[in-house]
Image (cartoon, grey):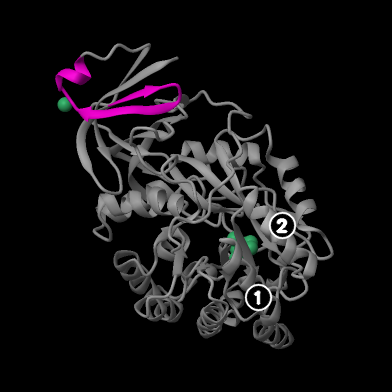
């Protein structure tokens, strides 16, 4: 069994910060003990990784990615191979991607399709949520089998009529099912029926630029859908996880539900914390680079998101990584913003942007790890295997240099997309070395990983449910 020691670093988890050495045996953490203690000094190892001056943190868990997602007549530009490699460069060692059940399809067919895309190609470990686009009697029955097979969360859409959309009756039935089988309902909360009316009216009035994407997808319609989803979950007696929360009014709905003691959770994404409608209004169609749903909001919403992250009304930051190239993909929507494929690249940037949030005073270091590693792991049934550094955990570990300054740019990133949503942004801190189950993936910024190292993760049910 290979023994690796990570010596001299500053270990940060969601609960502790300690100057400690980490012993890895057979791909798992065997011990974490005080640096320079006699126990640590007696360790023999095949490999010693010097972590002097580095943070030693759990690999990131990105619970919201869309590799190769077919959308708007095209498909997300990162494959599981390129997207998981980029994730590793950015210090993320686990993704939970969204498999899709299309209309008219059995869930199992959708899941098989996603396994065919991902299996044998990932650089890091991966699991799946299931997007339900066709809730019917068969779907409801199949949901139980999925939970048993380790796909324990289901995303429903109140938006995108005709594509992913479920009506309130379908949503209620699916929630009732998860109330019985231990699954977690994830919600895309936007009133898509009302949004489509506003889209039609905007286009008819000649408002075709990307910035109108943000205007028609109104914050009130996110808040209304969030409220409705919460009430439906209450009726069903099921937990609810609201994905990509961007509007202050939606945070308020989630906060109110949590104050009532309901099992309601909120997720936000770096784009809502660092970007705004100013980006959507960039000239020469550049705003298309920032078209995603829920949309970017005016800057004033950001304070509510940061506050929610501190109070735990928002408990997870994931990326909703769904990249489309500007050339040839985003351009499909020139002259009609509704034809711009929705989504932003970001799987590589999350850990750095959240570390910058630590430096900016928005969150603490341990909260950084909690939001990006520990809570998503617990939320989606991967803890304590993922998301922490503790005896028995997978040795998914990142050596993070908190002092290096870097400029985020498409010229240097590893995502398969021709622009960066954060082009030119300066951040302090950088991933140096990444281990996945004890194997080096990134070695002092030299990529040594391989497609196919990543294993499929059958997940338990959420560890936040009572
Ligand atoms: N939102 C996006 O921005 N892209 C994919 C799907 C979604 O809900
Ligand atoms: Zn020391
Ligand atoms: Zn969504
Ligand atoms: Zn998404």
Kindly identify which residue carries mark 1.
171
| Classed neighbour count for the residue bearing mark 1: other residues with Cα under 10 Å, few (<14), some (14–19), many (≥20) | many
Q: Looking at the figure, which quarter contains the C terminus?
A: bottom left
Question: Mark 2: few, some, or many residues within 10 Å (few <14, many ≥20)?
Answer: many
Give the quarter of the image for residue 191: bottom right
Q: What range is drawn magenta here?
A: 22-41
Which quarter of the image is occupied by the N terminus? top left
- Give the residue at x 68% y 52%: 76
Task: Name the side, left or right, on which 352 lies relative to 269.
Answer: left
Residue at 47% across / 51% down in the picture?
Answer: 423
Residue at point 69%, 54% (across, down): 145
Which residue in the structure is indicated by mark 2? 100
Decide whether residue 28 is among the magenta residues: yes
User: How far from the left and from the top, in percent, is residue 4?
Assistant: 37, 19
**Residue 33 in sight from this viewpoint:** yes
- Is label 2 or label 1 in front? 1
C-alpha distance separating marks 2 and 1: 16 Å
């Amino acid at each position: 069994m290979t023994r690796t020691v990570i010596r001299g670093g500053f270990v940060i988890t969601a609960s502790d910060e300690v100057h400690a050495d980490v012993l890895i045996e057979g791909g798992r953490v065997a011990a974490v003990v005080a640096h320079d203690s006699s126990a640590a000094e007696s360790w023999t190892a095949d490999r010693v990784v010097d972590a002097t001056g580095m943070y030693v943190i759990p690999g990131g868990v990105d619970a919201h990615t869309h590799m190769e997602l077919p959308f708007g007549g095209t498909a997300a530009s990162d494959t599981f191979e390129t997207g998981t490699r980029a994730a590793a460069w950015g210090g993320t060692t686990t993704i939970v991607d969204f498999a899709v059940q299309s209309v008219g399809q059995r869930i199992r067919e959708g899941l098989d399709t996603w396994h065919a895309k991902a299996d044998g190609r990932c650089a890091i470990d991966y699991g799946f949520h299931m997007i339900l686009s066709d809730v019917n009697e068969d779907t409801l029955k199949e949901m139980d089998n999925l939970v048993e097979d380790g796909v324990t969360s289901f995303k429903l859409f109140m938006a995108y009529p005709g594509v992913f959309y479920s009506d309130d009756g379908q949503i209620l039935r699916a929630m009732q099912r998860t109330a019985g089988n231990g699954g977690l309902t994830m919600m895309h909360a936007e009133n898509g029926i009302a949004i489509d009316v506003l889209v039609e009216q905007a286009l008819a009035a000649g408002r075709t630029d990307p910035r109108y994407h943000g205007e028609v997808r109104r914050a009130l319609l996110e808040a209304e859908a969030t409220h409705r989803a919460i009430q439906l979950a209450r009726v069903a007696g099921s937990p609810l996880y609201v994905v990509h929360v961007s509007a202050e009014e939606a945070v308020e709905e989630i906060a109110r539900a949590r104050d009532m003691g309901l099992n309601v959770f909120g997720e936000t994404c770096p784009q809502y914390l660092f970007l705004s409608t100013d980006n959507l209004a960039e000239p020469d169609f550049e705003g298309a680079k920032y078209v995603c749903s829920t949309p970017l909001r005016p800057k004033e919403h950001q304070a509510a998101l940061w506050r929610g992250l501190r109070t735990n009304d928002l408990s997870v930051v994931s990326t909703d990584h769904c990249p489309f190239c500007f050339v040839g993909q985003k351009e499909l929507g020139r002259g009609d913003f509704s034809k711009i494929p929705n989504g932003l690249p970001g799987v590589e940037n999350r850990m750095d942007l959240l570390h910058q949030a630590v430096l900016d005073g928005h969150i603490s270091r341990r909260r950084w790890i909690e939001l990006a590693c520990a809570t998503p792991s617990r939320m989606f049934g991967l803890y304590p295997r993922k998301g922490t550094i503790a005896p028995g955990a997978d040795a998914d570990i990142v050596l993070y240099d908190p002092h290096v300054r870097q400029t985020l740019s498409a010229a240097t990133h590893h995502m398969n997309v021709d622009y960066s949503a954060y082009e030119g942004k300066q951040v302090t801190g950088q991933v140096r070395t990444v281990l996945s189950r004890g194997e080096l993936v990134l070695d002092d910024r030299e990529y040594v990983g391989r497609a196919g190292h990543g294993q499929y993760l059958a997940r338990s049910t959420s560890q936040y449910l009572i």
